[in-house]
Image: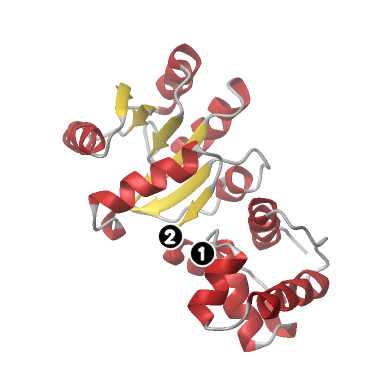
Amino acid sequence: MRVVLAEDSLLLREGLVRLLGEAGADVVDAVGDGDTLVRSVQEHRPDVAIVDVRMPPTFTDEGLRAALAARSAVPGTGVLVLSQYVEESYAGDLLADGAGGVGYLLKDRVSALADLSDALERVASGGTVLDPEVVAQLFARRRRDPLQTLTAREREVLALMAEGRTNVAIARLLVVTQGAVEKHISSILTKLDLPPSDDDHRRVLAVLAWLRAEH
């Protein structure tokens, strides 16, 4: 798997290069700012671009904006955001752009090399990987709570959907039948005015689009 890494801290960048190598990735380029990331993705066309959120010059959301620009320049590029922060601005655009192959993990919650390797594989194959804390903070930052119409179990199902879980995985985690999960999802999508879909990834994107939408 070919990877381009964008991390402004030299020490962290070098450490991540070694860690990614141990995870089975081939880091074809490691850069320190968003503009260089976009150029590098255009040049190397990696399977996945790994980006930090806060990068030079303002250290706000340059990494997310660069990731969006990179995906626009080279459609199909997987993006894994690896950051200390959950940054709402532009995160919704990245996660809900419908292109697939996207993840958002918090650095201090990646506790095992196998977790990082699994996340890379899922993103490279077009899947979605979200740290549960990222999902929780996106929910919490809503100015109004559209979840009020959902039951407690439907909220549990929706949170697992937003993490990218399949119906089978949700059923196993909640110890219910797959048919029960499908009924919960149908009810959730109806209550939130989202069109039902059998495509789990599209469903995750729909949930993320709802999280960031202004009502």
Q: Find out whether the residues at labels 2 and 1 contact each other: C-beta distance under 8 Å.
A: yes
Identify the image quadrant of residue 179: bottom right
Q: In front here: 14 or 127?
A: 127
Judge from the rendering whether residue 193 lies leftward or rightward of residue 16; answer left or right: right
The image position of residue 127, as x and y in percent, is: 54, 46
Which colouring convention does the figure follow?
A: secondary structure
Q: Residue at x 49, y 66 (%)?
A: 137
As drawn, 31 above or below 119? above
Q: Residue furthest bottom?
A: 152
Disc 1 element: helix
Q: Position of residue 10 (x, y in %)?
A: 20, 31
Q: Residue at x 23, y 37 (%)?
A: 16
Give the image location of residue 31, x and y in percent: 32, 24
Disc marking residue 135 = 1
Residue 214 as seen in the image, left or right of residue 19: right
Could one spot residue 161 in this view of the protein? yes
User: Where the C terminus falls, by quadrant?
Assistant: bottom right
- Disc 2 packing (10 Å; few <14; some 14–19; many ≥20): some
Which three-letter amino acid code belongs to the residue tagged 2? Answer: Asp
Q: Residue at x 29, y 55 (%)?
A: 110
Q: Secondary structure at mark 2?
A: loop
Q: Amino acid at mark 1?
A: Val
Q: Residues within 10 Å of mark 1 (few under 14, many from 20)?
A: some
- Residue drawn where x is 48% and y is 42% of the image: 123
From the image, tell me which residue sits under label 2: 131
Distance from disc 2 to disc 1, alpha carbons, whole Å, reads 7 Å
Q: Quadrant of the N terminus?
A: top left
Quick check: 101 left or right of 82?
Answer: right
Q: Indicate the position of residue 138 as horizontal and vertical percent values.
A: 54, 64
Q: Quadrant of residue 5?
A: top left
